[in-house]
């Protein structure tokens, strides 16, 4: 079978699959007019993906011991380098000053890496440092040049040209009044070249006709700018130092959006600027990438200083943002009105304060919510805020009722069950996979390649075992080839395993060794993420069973018997918790029976955790209900207690 698959012959089992709740029954829920108006508030304050409000981002940055240490070190570096700029530009002209110039030229400034997980706030940290942390007098001596790699096309072959072009534009914009140099500016920038030509090759022309010499000089400089842009950029940087007493601070931002080889090219370009020109280079980089490059890459060859930024918890991030909103709502009314109007918010200040308090109740005072969002987002701040926005604007939460309660001085806190439902359902009356980018129906299988509904969970179980059995960062990854070989004795098709790995990758339940490489192939290496672990937890350790009850209704299955009796149960009226548990029991029983058909767990000890997982599933949702029922009959305990 596996030989045929390798040769391109694929024969998969097909089934007609149907869910208890059909697609036609899933609909958008009605939103009140107030809730629709409030959505703009949440987009303005809790979605940073567009980065349109640097003031809020900087003010709401979550400080840590590491970030404060980085602040102090970066300010010290800036102060020391600016002192050297003053030395370089002293007008004493003594031999001692010349000697100091030479020693400074050898030092070449500083090269700093800001290390942190994707979404840790590296870009915000750097922006905040120059805008709010760095002493204002020191800031005036800095020429901050930000190159946002997210704007590039990602072509590794042309990235050097793109960086030179962007650096040229940044320099001209920041140095010259009209965003470009005048002839007189160019004469100053290329003064050494001007003197060399006027006293050397074109001295006769200079003595005979200075205007014609100037035209000739302009043509020569024009060719340098057009044909040798890197040389022109170097002249601009040196002119900023020597004539304006500015220290170039060049930030290579968002390189972590691209493959490792691309990041290496950017890093090498940054190093070339650092070696050629006195400068302060800052490169934000992911912790995984810096670890990879330190093993085999340019980091082995070049000097640099590292500062690590840990990822703050979702609760900490939201706490800072609530404090920000409160402070804005309490400022002078005219300033406050102007601020909120610019953000597109048409609410009274009491409404804004009520909004802040409502968010505080849901996200900050409920530890479960912050943890769940953080794990689903793999601690990526941007994704955490997107999930928070999805939850709080769901009609199931009806945040407008919460705000109205605050407006009249009452305390209103949503039920934990409704919070979970809002997280699952979003704007719909049931879970809808096409509307959910953060939660995956982990039981769903394709009708053209039917397999065990437990296959994705089995893959996660394997990777959780790998993660738990090592302390070495490199060893927590397992190659796709190893995963395929693991499931081959369990009689699972290579093609089907790859399909399920791809789905897990797409929804970030697992992640690749290179975060930008999302293809599934034998040499690819993957590990389980926090998102994958909390999905596993939804299935095996969620006492309320919200995820399980909804997947019981929305997962396409092959059993008409299960569909029929579940629909009958739903038609019987409002269900009690015992009724929902019975539906989950039927669903889990179906999944376990399908699993036995499509997966044969070998007796080897390597598969012990797979057997334990299936037993845990049965104990949690089938045997536990039987035990509770017996206790209820004996009068010792009611199921709903």
Image (cartoon, rainbow, N blue to C red):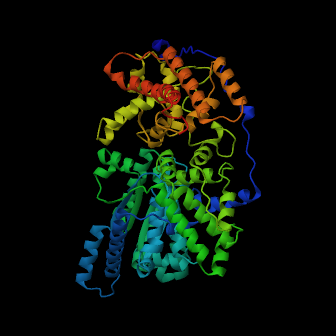
Between 21 and 401, the one lying in front of the other is 401
- Visible residue check, residue 557: yes
Between 409 and 106, the one lying in front of the other is 409
The answer to which image quadrant residue 530 occupies is top left
Vertical position of residue 92 compared to residue 321: above or below: below
Between 92 and 115, the one lying in front of the other is 115
Q: Give me the residue at 66% from left, 81% from top.
A: 334
Relative image position of residue 563 (x, y in whole percent): 66, 22
The answer to which image quadrant residue 309 occupies is bottom left
- Visible residue check, residue 510: no
**Image-based side of 338 in relation to 3, left or right:** right
**Image-based side of 215 in relation to 466, left or right:** right
Total count of labels: 0
Q: Give me the residue at 54% from left, 21% from top.
A: 589
Name, please, the residue furthest toward the bottom. 92
Vertical position of residue 417 compared to residue 61: above or below: above
**Image-based side of 570 in relation to 112, left or right:** right
Relative image position of residue 67 (x, y in whole percent): 38, 64
Vertical position of residue 102 compared to residue 45: above or below: below
Q: Give me the residue at 33% from left, 69% from top.
A: 73
Relative image position of residue 246 (x, y in whole percent): 42, 77
Name, please, the residue furthest toward the front. 635
């Amino acid at each position: 079978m596996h030989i045929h698959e390798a040769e391109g012959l694929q024969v998969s089992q097909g089934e007609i699959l149907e869910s208890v709740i059909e697609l036609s029954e899933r609909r958008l829920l009605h939103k009140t007019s107030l809730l629709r108006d409030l959505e703009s508030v949440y987009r303005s304050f809790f979605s940073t993906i567009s980065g349109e409000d640097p003031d809020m981002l900087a003010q709401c940055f979550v400080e840590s011991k590491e970030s404060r240490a980085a602040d102090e070190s970066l300010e010290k570096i800036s102060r020391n380098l600016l002192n050297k700029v003053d030395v370089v530009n002293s007008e004493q002209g003594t031999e001692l000053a010349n000697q100091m110039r030479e020693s400074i030229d050898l030092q070449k400034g500083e090269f700093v890496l800001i290390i942190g997980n994707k979404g840790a706030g590296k870009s915000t940290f750097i922006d905040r440092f120059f805008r709010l942390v760095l002493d204002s007098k020191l800031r005036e001596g800095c020429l901050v040049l930000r190159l946002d790699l997210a704007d590039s096309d990602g072509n590794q072959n042309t990235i050097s040209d793109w960086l030179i072009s962007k650096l040229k534009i940044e320099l001209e914009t920041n140095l010259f009044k009209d965003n470009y140099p005048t002839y007189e500016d160019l004469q100053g920038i290329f003064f050494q070249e001007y003197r060399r030509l006027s006293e050397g090759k074109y001295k006769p022309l200079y003595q005979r006709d200075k205007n014609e010499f100037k035209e000739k000089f302009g043509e020569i400089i024009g060719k340098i700018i057009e044909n040798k842009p890197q040389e022109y950029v170097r002249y601009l940087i040196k002119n900023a130092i020597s004539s304006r007493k500015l220290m170039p601070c060049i930030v290579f931002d968002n390189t972590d959006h691209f493959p490792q080889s691309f990041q290496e090219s950017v890093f090498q370009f940054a190093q070339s600027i650092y070696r050629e020109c006195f400068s302060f280079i800052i490169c934000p980089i992911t912790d995984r990438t810096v670890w990879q490059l330190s093993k085999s890459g340019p980091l082995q060859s070049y000097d640099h200083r590292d500062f690590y930024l840990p990822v703050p918890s979702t609760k900490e991030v939201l706490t800072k943002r609530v404090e920000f909103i409160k402070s804005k709502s309490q400022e002078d009314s005219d300033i406050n009105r102007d601020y909120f109007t610019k953000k597109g918010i048409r609410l009274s200040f009491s409404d804004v304060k009520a909004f802040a308090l409502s968010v505080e109740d849901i996200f900050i005072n409920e530890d479960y919510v912050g943890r769940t969002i953080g794990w689903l987002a793999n601690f990526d701040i941007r994704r955490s805020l997107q999930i928070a926005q999805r939850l709080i604007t769901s009609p199931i939460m009806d945040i407008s009722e919460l705000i109205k309660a605050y407006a009249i001085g009452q305390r209103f806190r949503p039920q934990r069950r409704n919070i979970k439902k809002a997280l699952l359902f979003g704007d719909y009356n049931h879970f809808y996979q096409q509307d959910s980018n953060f939660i995956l129906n982990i039981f769903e299988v394709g009708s053209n390649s039917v397999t065990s509904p437990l296959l994705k969970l089995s893959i996660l179980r394997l990777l959780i075992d790998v993660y738990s059995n090592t302390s070495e960062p490199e060893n927590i990854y397992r190659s796709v080839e190893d995963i395929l070989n693991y499931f081959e004795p369990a009689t699972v098709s290579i093609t089907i395993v790859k399909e399920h790995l791809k789905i897990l990758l797409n929804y970030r339940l697992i992640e690749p060794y290179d975060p930008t490489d999302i293809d599934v192939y034998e040499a690819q290496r993957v590990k389980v993420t926090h998102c994958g672990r909390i999905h596993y937890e939804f299935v095996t350790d969620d006492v309320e069973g919200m995820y399980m009850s909804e997947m019981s209704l929305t997962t396409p299955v092959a059993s008409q018997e299960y569909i029929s009796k579940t629909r009958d149960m739903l038609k019987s009226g409002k269900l009690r918790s015992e009724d929902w548990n019975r539906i989950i029991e039927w669903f889990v029983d179906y999944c376990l029976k399908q699993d036995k058909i499509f997966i044969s767990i070998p007796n080897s000890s390597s598969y012990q955790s797979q057997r334990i997982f299936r037993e845990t599933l049965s104990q949690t949702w089938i045997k536990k209900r039987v035990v509770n029922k017996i206790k209820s009959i004996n009068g010792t305990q009611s199921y709903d207690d």
